[in-house]
Image: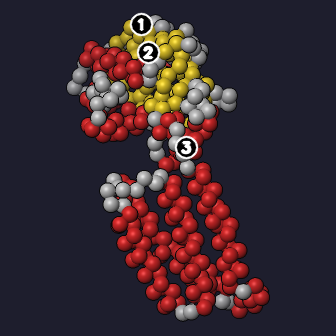
Amino acid sequence: MFTYSEAFWIAVALAAFFVLCAAAFYSTLKRSVGWTLGLAVVICLGLSALVSQLTVGVPYFIFYPLVVMFSAIPLAAVIVALLWAAVLRWGPVRQRFARFGTVPLVLAIMVPALIGVGIAYERQRLPELACAHSHIPVQLGQLQVQLPLILHADVFVSDPVRSLGYRPKPRYREDVKKLCKLTRGGQTPVQSEMIWLASMSFMKALDARCAEEDDALCQGYSPERQAQIGAVRVMRKTETALRYELDLLNATPKPGERRAGNAQSGHVCQTRSTLGGTHHCRMWRTLAPDVVILMTSDHVQETNFEDLLSVMEAEMTYMLRILAVRGT
């Protein structure tokens, strides 16, 4: 089974595309279009066979994109090359470029293209450090947490405030690299204003992990409870952090609502008649003088406020444990 990163295969795919473009372009100018199409078929079959051999044991969610990617490369390359060659075979254009020769023209395009491939690979390549594959330290005011990569978090870093996705997906690799740099390889906490976690983003990955392992992340984890949670935010306690929740808390109670607490800790629950009579709660706790955690439930049916609040209490305890929250 291959251990190369997906970034490696992205670079290979881009390089193969440009190489095939050049080969098809050169052959179209020197030989017939039929010869070029025949070459593309042979290359396509060869690449498909190669991918089939190289991806033995690779999970299906990696295997199928690879097959599609490598099967599409020859076809796309041939189309581009045929259009390219047709333009250059047109009289006025051909006369202008004839003095350069075919090989220099191919190299003039290949060299910058392959340099671009190298840059794309480097931007996608992750360091072999814990910050890129396991967790990073995050500082929120007087609170420090260890944020696991598997939680698919959005980290709102300070100075300047911007959101970086700390997620094990290819599209977030540049963000992960930035967070590794900000934490100096995971050694120094990154200053943050808020960490945002959505259950629907990490539940599938956590379910799969806990089905095979029983490590610290899985101890106390309950898919049934987590399915009732919408999102979790650990954030700096600013004037606007809990404005919506405190406005609800201090407003005149309405039928089908439940509320209790104060600015330090509390909850607000509502029944949403427009959503089929579902229950929805928002719960918050002060973790440090300048840090608060806010948990919102999903819109849940076939339950009551007491049961839903009990689930949220248990999930809040679980989240704070796996984040290894501690004061500084």
| Residue hosting label 2 | 284
- Look at the image and tell me whether residue 278 can be seen: no
Identify the amino acid type marked 1: Gly
For label 1, the SS is: strand
Tell me which corner region of the image, top left, top right, bottom left or bottom right, holds residue 270: top left
User: Which mark is on residue 127?
Assistant: 3
Camera-side mark, 2 or 3: 3
User: Is residue 112 left or right of 58 when viewed as pictured?
Assistant: right
What kind of residue is marked 3?
Pro
What residue do we see at 55% from left, 65% from top?
Answer: 14
The amino acid marked with disc number 2 is Trp
- Per the rendering, the mark at residue 261 is 1
Name above or below for residue 14 compared with residue 255. below
N-terminal label among 2 and 1: 1
Provide residue 292's location: percent of width, then percent of height: 50, 16
Regarding mark 2 in the picture, which secondary structure is present there? Answer: strand
Name which of mark 1 and mark 3 comes first in the sequence. 3
Q: Residue at x 50, y 22 (%)?
A: 145
Element on which disc 3 rests? loop
Q: Is residue 191 visible?
A: yes
Instruction: List x then y, in percent, for residue 246.
Output: 49, 13
Q: Is 88 rendered above or below residue 251? A: below
For the residues carrying marks 2 and 1, which lies nearer the camera in this image?
2
- The span from disc 2 to disc 1 (Cα, nearest Å) is 9 Å
Answer whether labels 2 and 1 touch (C-beta < 8 Å).
yes
Q: Indicate the quadrant containing the N terminus: top left, top right, bottom left or bottom right.
A: bottom left
